[in-house]
Image (cartoon, helix red, strand yellow):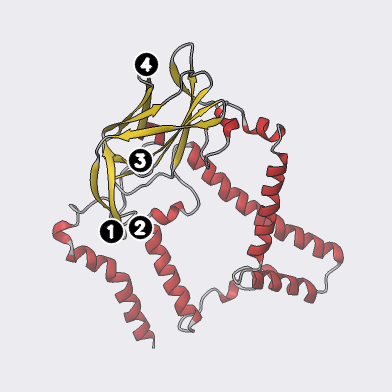
Amino acid sequence: MRQFLFLLLSCFFSVPVLALFNDAPTAFSASKANPSLFETSTDTFLPLEKAYRLAISINNEQKKIYLDWDIADDYYLYRHRFAVELFVDGQAVASSTVYEPGLVAYDEYYERELEKFYRHTRIEVNHDQAMLSGLSLRVGFQGCADAGLCYPPEYWNYRYKADSGVFVRAAADLSAQPGHEQFLKGVSTVEVIEGGDRARFALMLLFAFLGGLLLNLMPCVFPVLSIKVMSFATHAMRPAVLHRHGWSYTLGVISSLLVFVGILLALKAAGKAVGWGFQLQSPVFVGLLVYLFFMLGLSFSGVLSFGERLMNLGSS
């Protein structure tokens, strides 16, 4: 049995190496969008604002607004992800957009033919507004890098300054769904909440609480909670000791989540395009997960047993 297990593990762990040898003639000339399992990419991705630069100009006589995009080398923008909206005093107004022809090619991310823009493109926005006072502009877009990274969809908001005749970036930018006109006027999040969105904020907290309760009923969580409750019930401890154990367990879960969120915020502040599950974009991480679940499968099937000494460590 041990010899069979050793042979099985040897074959499993040698698969990536054999794949590299089989693809040796083209291993280093393959597309960067499909790195091998253990290939470590040396590419450093640009922050979103450096990868995609937007300059806005306006022609009052022809009632046109021009969006000129300067795109960094090896980066591109999706044609179908563009969304341009005009607002006057917070109310949406009619407009139409004209796009330049882009490069049509098969996209591995969306798995279909898509139009993309490289290096530079211009979007022409036509409107019928005679008065431009209170004019705001929302631009939605999504871009990717040829090396394999796709940024999340983004929304940039601009306000037109009639005295200087230019568009300036809104003080509080939207990265969420359209429809929050308060942000287009440069109102901060705190001011919006204090100005009448308390009910919406309270509703968000309520749904977050209900979502947490629902997650606790999941098969991967509820049995763990029941085991913890049973351990409290079976141990002859004083109420003060039980309370201390319960609070330490709760604070441990909350603090671990706060640490994880803090790491995500620190990475985003450093200019990294990360979010929930961003580590799944790394081929090395996905490969390690494959090996981890393979070992867990062997453990569940009884072929391997490890970590038995650590199972009751928290109860001791």
Q: Give the mark, 3 or 2, whose residue is nearer the N terminus.
A: 3
Give the residue at x 44% y 74%. 295
| Residue under label 2 | 283
- Mark 2 Cα within 10 Å, few/some/many (few <14, many 20+)? some
Residue 221 in the image: above or below residue 285: below
Pair 3/4: label in front = 4
Q: Which mark is residue 61?
A: 4
Give the residue at x 69% y 69%. 225
* Residue 34 picture location, percent across and down: 28, 55
Give the residue at x 49% y 78%. 299
* Residue 223 picture location, percent across and down: 65, 73
Residue 137 in the image: above or below residue 294: above
Label 4 amino acid? Glu
Label 3 amino acid? Phe
Q: Give the mark, 3 or 4, whose residue is nearer the N terminus.
A: 3
Q: Which mark is residue 45?
A: 3
Label 2 amino acid? Pro
Q: Give the mark, 4 or 2, whose residue is nearer the N terminus.
A: 4
* Residue 72 picture location, percent across and down: 29, 34
Q: Which mark is residue 36?
A: 1
- For marks 3 and 1, give the CA distance: 19 Å
Residue 115 in the image: above or below residue 24: above
- Mark 1 Cα within 10 Å, few/some/many (few <14, many 20+)? many
> Horizontally, is 36 left or right of 185 in the view?
left
- For marks 3 and 2, give the CA distance: 16 Å
> Horizontally, is 129 left or right of 211 in the view?
left
- Residues at discs 1 and 2 in contact (Cβ within 8 Å): yes
- Residues at discs 4 and 1 in contact (Cβ within 8 Å): no
